[in-house]
Image: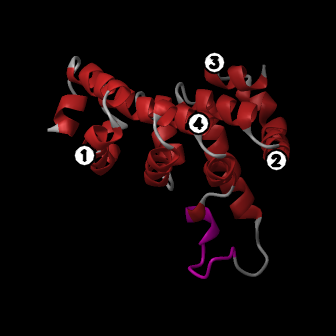
Amino acid sequence: QVVLLSSHPYGCRVIQRILEHCLPEQTRPILDELHKGVEHLVKDQYGNYVIQHVLEHGSNEDKSRIIQNLRGRVCALSSHKFASNVMEKAIANAAPSERAILIEEILHPVANVNINGSGSAGAGDTSSLTTSNSSSLVDMMKDQYANYVVQRMLELADTEQRRVLINRIRPMQNVLRKFNYGKHIIA
């Protein structure tokens, strides 16, 4: 019933208040149920607020469990109206090592690395790899929701990842200027 309540306009507020004011032994069963429903709740109109609440106020263990669930879907979730807010909170509240993994996912998407099934681009050809990586980032920067996630990544990335992000964005400035949401990144 926790996932169902979390998906309700008033129920989501009740769950958040329980997480704030009850003892850990009282909230643990609720958190365990939330973890089982993360995939649904991040995309839910009201459930996303509960997940954001855990990312902002929860224990490091609970934050890590949610972030683990988001991994592998950063680009897709960032483009979703409600899940994009969860992604922003995840990036803002992740441990530095977890944040680096989430950012790395858009810099080097796993699906693009395994082009020939062996885990490499094959025969030293990385042109399609670079284009594909860049297009994921471009798609995110042009998206009405994902562009905010990219902005948050730029803001919170470590020095090296920020440098890589900027180096990927810089050659695309002219393309991005043509899109309302891309302009936010350039600014």
Q: Tell me the amino acid under the disc marked 2.
A: Val
Front disc: 1 or 2: 1
What residue would you read off at disc 2? 164
Place of residue 45 in the rendered image (x, y in percent of width and height, measured from the top left): 31, 25
Q: Earlier in the sequence, mark 1 or mark 4?
A: 1
**Residue drawn at point x = 84 percent, y = 36 percent:** 170
Q: Tell me the amino acid under the disc marked 4.
A: Asn
Decide: is 162 above or below 148. below
Q: Earlier in the sequence, mark 4 or mark 2?
A: 4
What residue would you read off at disc 3? 180
Front disc: 3 or 2: 2
Could you give the CA–CA distance between mark 1 and mark 2, rounded to whole angstroms?
41 Å
> Dot 3: few (<14), some (14–19), or many (≥20) neighbours within 10 Å?
few
Front disc: 4 or 2: 4
Decide: is 162 above or below 132. above
Foreground pick, 132 / 146: 146
Q: How many marks?
A: 4
Tag 3, which secondary structure? helix
Could you give the CA–CA distance between mark 4 and mark 2, rounded to whole angstroms?
21 Å
What residue would you read off at disc 4? 93
Decide: is 130 above or below 91. below
Front disc: 1 or 4: 1
